[in-house]
Image: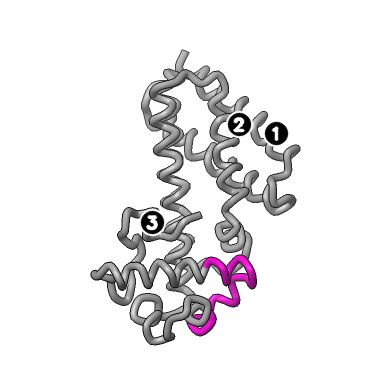
Amino acid sequence: MGDPAAEHGGGWPVPLRRTPRQARSRARLARVLEAAERVLVRDGVQALTTTRVAAEAGVSVGSLYQYLPDRDAIIDALAAGYLARLEAAMDDLVTVAEAEQWDDPVGVLIDAYAAIYRTGHGFRALWFGSSLTEQTRAADREHKRRMADGVRRIVLVLGLAHDDEALARACHAAVLAADALAQEAFRRDPEGDPGLLDEAGLMLRGYLTGVAARYR
């Protein structure tokens, strides 16, 4: 997964001690976040100290401290980039759904996000650990609501339901269930436990069928 700067078109989605203005400063911060991800994947979240990350990035601790003063700030910045990529993928899927008629929308969504999880080594290292900050947990809750809204939009463009509060609630429930199953599948196997992913698909297809039946 890319760094938060790339995922947000050059802007940072979390508060920084100082916002980089010049291209050189933005490039330095992007390099720091790439280094932080390498440390995270290789050594785990507890290794995300300003000293370790600065050394990995080849910058001074003082330079890093201008933007990311501690481990929590580093975690928040990395997490924001990961969540942004997942949301951008959902937006792309909504666009594709508008142009196509999917016979198996659940399968399309599961395959798309399983592919992201397989390459998202930093995302897995962060989410499967126990060191998420309160800010990141709050961001993740909002992220799930945005993902649910993406699912809602897909359901609507495929003509499976009418837009109402019950549909929004159902899509949120589906995202919460899918997220829990995906995390367990990738804890068991870095490629995603195929049996558990199949069960997730079976469960979610049944749920989607039940939701769509309410609108007939």
* Residue underneath mark 3: 6
Q: Residue at x 59, y 29 (%)?
A: 107
Give 129 or 52, whichever is nearer the viewer. Answer: 52
Q: Residue at x 59, y 51 (%)?
A: 119
Q: Give the foreground label among 2 and 1.
A: 1
Q: Residue 150 at what x, y percent from top left?
A: 42, 37
Residue most toward the top?
Answer: 216
- 47 vs 99, left or right, is right
* Residue underneath mark 2: 204
- Highlighted magenta segment, given as a residue range: 37-52
Can residue 68 be seen here? The reply is: yes
Q: Residue 56 at what x, y percent from top left?
A: 52, 77
Task: Name the mark on residue 198.
Answer: 1
Q: Can you say whether 153 is above or below 101 in the image?
A: below
Which of disc 1 and disc 2 is earlier in sequence?
1
Q: Magenta stretch mostly in which secondary structure?
A: helix
Tell me the amino acid under the disc marked 1.
Answer: Asp
Tell me the amino acid under the disc marked 2.
Answer: Leu
**SS assignment at label 1:** helix
- 38 vs 29, left or right, is right
Which of disc 3 and disc 2 is earlier in sequence?
3
